[in-house]
Image: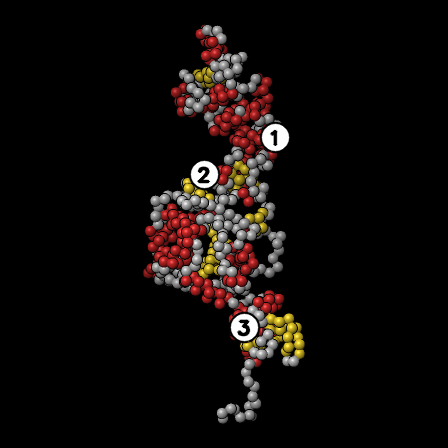
């Protein structure tokens, strides 16, 4: 039978030769020899025996037709076949290489001729064969492997080491059957293959391949508009989602827990959102755009979102948990204390709570404790587009640009001492005012919503395109809630209104600060440092570097204010009261 051209042979054809003694007549050129080796691999476990014969070793690119054209008779051909069948070096069933993808890859690469049999050649062969399976990540000081959908951490390089063993086995099988080598070359190649049975040689191969086809953390999930899903990759850069096949070279290490099905719906989700938002269409639309934006790494808005509800069972946790379940690797939770002001923080310590946020697109902190003071500097960094430096324990430092939307799910609005975050429009409060009574609750709701994951994904995609069309202008309800939070968070403003009154006199700033510190302590609030307190007074036009107090010029005064408890008229109890 004829195998046809190089691209005609199919592995299933081998079944026709089940139990047969097969002689493969190879053309005397590289494509012909590769085809013959591929057929040999496919015959493993099927043919009784198999051997490759090149009828025209002296005729470049010669085939069987050239053999007879050179004057050989049928009798000569029969002798050639008998010689091959009876040869002690004939490859029998036990030595026919297994028809594994690895062996076929070696045949395709012409590995015996292309790669040297030293350490460097072994590393290059490993890197070439496993380019889309195993790559080293120097940031993590470890290997990563591709599972067909995403790149995953390969702890202690276990899969890379296992792949090295598989490659060593494949090289040994390939070495037995490769036809392009003379006997001396075959002998040397078999010795090379045998060396790779040793741990030391395989370990050297893996270690020496680290600097070939590697990538760092900063190269992972780099495209802000690619969304990895279970059944495809979505390109969200155009007017409509574009479906791409999974591809190792996209360097995606995250994947949603959903598949793309343009026809999928989410009626229960839409009903639930409507009930939670009490039918407020503006808030529903705003919420949809925020969550749609979380499908991307776009952070142009630079906003921090509070899902705030003073009552319990108001639905905000249902929304957050459902969206996090769908986003899967693209979502993360952090302890609210991560965002709190910390004393004497050592910049040299590992920051895994921040490092794990690299590449995520939604980060949620739930239920910050009462009176927690936000680290506004950190919040500005995380919601902005400045690069952040972080590191995991026992790993190298790396820099990343935050791509996530930061959301606080809370029953209590934490203390924010830096009013500039309000002035810059970074804060948005979405209030959850509905309380679901016991009779209104569905204990299985979250599980039922997860079944609509594909439909909710479509709802979020629609929100993303609404955002592109309309922007993210907050509705009146969100503006009102945010304004209330700003007023409540203005601690120094509250202190001034409660403890100071306008006057034509000045008060020493140090006395005002002492009063302020006691007021904060009595109120259970954090106390600003003296310098920050003075700076805030200065921005309000109340602080002077010098001024007159009781006829004397003193440094650092609060202008035009005295303590409220001094603004009462003092009278002698023996003096008659007015109008008596």
Q: Residue at x 35, y 46 (%)?
A: 264
435 sits to left or right of 493: left
Q: Residue at x 34, y 52 (%)?
A: 268
The answer to which of 265 and 325 lies nearer the viewer is 265
Give residue 155's quadrant in the image: top right
User: Picture coordinates of residue 409 (x, y %)?
Assistant: 45, 58
Circle 1: element type? helix
Report if the CB atoms under discs 3 and 2 are less than 8 Å apart.
Answer: no
The answer to which of 105 and 579 lies nearer the viewer is 579
Which of the two discs, 2 and 1, sits closer to the camera?
A: 2
User: Picture coordinates of residue 362 (x, y %)?
Assistant: 47, 52
Q: Residue at x 48, y 11 (%)?
A: 67
Report if the CB atoms under discs 2 and 1 are less than 8 Å apart.
Answer: no
Circle 2: element type? loop
Q: What residue does disc 2 label?
A: 246
Residues under labels 2 and 1: Cα distance? Answer: 31 Å
The answer to which of 542 and 265 lies nearer the viewer is 542
Q: Residue at x 53, y 54 (%)?
A: 384
Residues under labels 3 and 1: Cα distance? Answer: 74 Å
Relative vertical location of residue 435 with respect to residue 248 in this rendering, above or below: below
User: Picture coordinates of residue 233 (x, y %)?
Assistant: 44, 41
- Label 3 or label 1, whichever comes before in sequence order: 1
Structural crowding at the residue carrying mark 1, measured as other residues with C-alpha within 10 Å and reported as few (<14), some (14–19) or many (≥20): some
Relative vertical location of residue 299 with respect to residue 176 in this rendering, above or below: below
User: Picture coordinates of residue 485 (x, y %)?
Assistant: 47, 65
Residues under labels 3 and 2: Cα distance? Answer: 60 Å
Circle 3: element type? helix
Q: What residue does disc 1 label?
A: 120
> Which image quarter is the N terminus in?
top left
Q: What residue does disc 3 label?
A: 496
- Label 3 or label 2, whichever comes before in sequence order: 2
């Amino acid at each position: 039978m004829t195998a046809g051209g190089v691209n005609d042979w199919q592995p299933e054809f081998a079944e026709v030769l089940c139990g047969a003694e097969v002689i493969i007549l190879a053309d005397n050129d590289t494509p012909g020899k590769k085809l013959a080796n591929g057929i040999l691999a496919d015959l493993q476990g099927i043919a009784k025996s198999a051997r490759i014969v090149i009828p025209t070793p002296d005729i470049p690119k010669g085939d069987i037709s050239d053999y007879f054209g050179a004057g050989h008779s049928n009798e000569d051909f029969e002798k050639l076949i008998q010689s091959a069948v009876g040869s002690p070096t004939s490859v029998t069933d036990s030595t026919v290489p297994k028809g594994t993808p690895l062996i076929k890859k070696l045949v395709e690469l012409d590995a015996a001729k292309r790669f040297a049999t030293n350490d460097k050649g072994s590393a290059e062969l490993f890197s070439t064969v496993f380019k889309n399976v195993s790559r080293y990540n120097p940031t993590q000081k470890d290997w990563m492997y591709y599972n067909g959908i995403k790149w995953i951490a390969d702890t202690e390089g276990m899969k890379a080491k296992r792949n090295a063993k598989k490659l060593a086995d494949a090289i040994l099988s390939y070495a037995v059957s490769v036809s392009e080598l003379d006997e001396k070359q075959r002998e040397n190649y078999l010795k090379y293959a045998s060396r790779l049975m040793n741990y030391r040689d395989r370990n050297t191969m893996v270690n020496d391949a680290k600097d070939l086809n590697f990538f760092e953390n900063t190269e992972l999930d780099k495209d802000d508009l690619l969304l990895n899903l279970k059944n495809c990759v979505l390109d969200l850069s155009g007017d409509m989602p574009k479906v791409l096949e999974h591809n190792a070279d996209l360097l995606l290490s995250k994947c949603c827990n959903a598949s793309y099905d343009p026809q999928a719906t989410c009626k229960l989700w839409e009903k639930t959102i409507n009930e939670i938002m009490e039918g407020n269409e503006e808030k529903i639309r705003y919420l949809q755009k925020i969550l749609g934006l979380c499908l991307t790494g776009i952070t142009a808005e630079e906003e921090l979102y509070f899902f705030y509800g003073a009552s319990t069972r108001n639905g905000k946790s249902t929304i957050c948990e459902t969206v996090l379940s769908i986003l899967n690797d693209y979502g993360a939770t952090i302890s609210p204390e991560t965002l709190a002001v910390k004393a004497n923080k050592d910049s040299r310590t590992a920051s895994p709570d921040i490092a794990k946020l690299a590449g995520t697109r939604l980060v949620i902190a739930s239920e910050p404790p009462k009176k927690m003071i936000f680290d506004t500097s950190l919040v500005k960094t995380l919601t902005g587009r400045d690069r952040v430096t972080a590191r995991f324990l026992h790993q190298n430092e790396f820099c990343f640009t935050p791509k996530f939307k930061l959301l606080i799910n809370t029953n209590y609005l934490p203390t924010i001492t830096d009013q500039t975050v309000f002035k810059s429009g970074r804060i948005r409060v979405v209030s959850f005012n509905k309380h679901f009574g016991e009779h209104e609750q569905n204990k299985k709701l979250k599980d039922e919503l997860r079944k609509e994951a594909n439909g909710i994904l479509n709802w979020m995609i629609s929100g993303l395109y609404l955002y592109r069309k309309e922007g993210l202008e907050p509705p009146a309800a969100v503006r009102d809630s945010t304004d209330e939070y700003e007023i409540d968070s203005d601690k120094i403003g509250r202190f001034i209104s409660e403890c100071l009154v306008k006057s034509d006199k000045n008060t020493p700033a140090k006395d005002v600060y002492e009063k302020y510190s006691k007021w904060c302590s009595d109120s259970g609030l954090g106390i600003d440092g003296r310098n920050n307190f003075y700076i805030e007074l200065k921005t309000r036009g109340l602080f002077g570097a010098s001024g007159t107090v009781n006829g004397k010029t003193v440094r650092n005064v609060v202008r035009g204010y005295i303590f409220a408890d001094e603004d009462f008229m003092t009278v002698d109890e023996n003096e008659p009261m007015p109008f008596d």
